[in-house]
Image: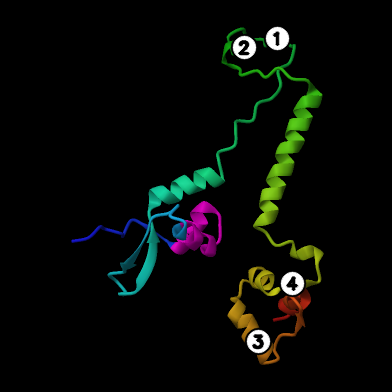
Amino acid sequence: MGLDYSTWLTKQQAADAIGVSTKLVEQLAKEKKLQSAKWKRPESGAWVSVYHPDDVARERKERNPDAPAFVLPATDEQPEDPDAQTNALAVRQSPGEFLQALAAAVEATSQNSQKHSVRTAERLFLTLPEAADYSGLPQAHLRRSMAEGKLTGLKTGSGWRIRRTDLENL
């Protein structure tokens, strides 16, 4: 009898755990960075792609390493409790250096979050994938709605654009 794949992660579970798209999970498996297999679900009989949980955990750690501990700069003031000084972790840096490090950390965090989020509040028209993300509806449903005339879309050289207000009126 073969391996028990019931504890392995589905493509969507692996993508959520790593913080990437399902297409990237497929690419990682193709590049042999994730061990994958086909597994027949006993309850439905459907075949699904599953991914080894240890490989998924390793890939997540590589892509989203744990942030270092946040440490406040040391002050020249002595604590009231002399034992408290032995338990405190002190960092010797000027307030300017601390603020620069903090600004760099905030910038890095905002750049990472912008890669995975749609900035829909700033634009009138959204691409089809952004419109699907914004509305929570599948792209195929949005395409059907445009074909049926229920939703207006603009065909551009790089794909469809859908007005945000039209999505809100659906």
Callout in the foreground (3, 2): 3
SS of the residue under disc 1 = loop
Q: CA distance from mark 4 to mark 1?
A: 56 Å
**Which amino acid does the dot numbered 2 rest on?**
Gln
SS of the residue under disc 2 = helix
Callout in the foreground (4, 2): 4
- How far across and how far down the image is residue 65, in percent? 55, 40
Q: CA distance from mark 3 to mark 1?
A: 68 Å
Q: Which residues are magenta?
A: 11-28
SS of the residue under disc 3 = helix
Q: CA distance from mark 4 to mark 2?
A: 55 Å
Q: CA distance from mark 3 to mark 4?
A: 15 Å
Question: Is mark 1 in CB contact (under 8 Å) with mark 2?
Answer: yes
Residue under the image location 51 percent in, 52 percent down: 18
In the rendered structure, which disc, 3 or 4, sits on the residue that comes first in sequence? 4
Callout 4 crowding tier (Cα within 10 Å): few <14, some 14–19, many ≥20? many
**Which residue has dot 2 on it?**
85
- How far across and how far down the image is residue 25, in percent? 49, 59
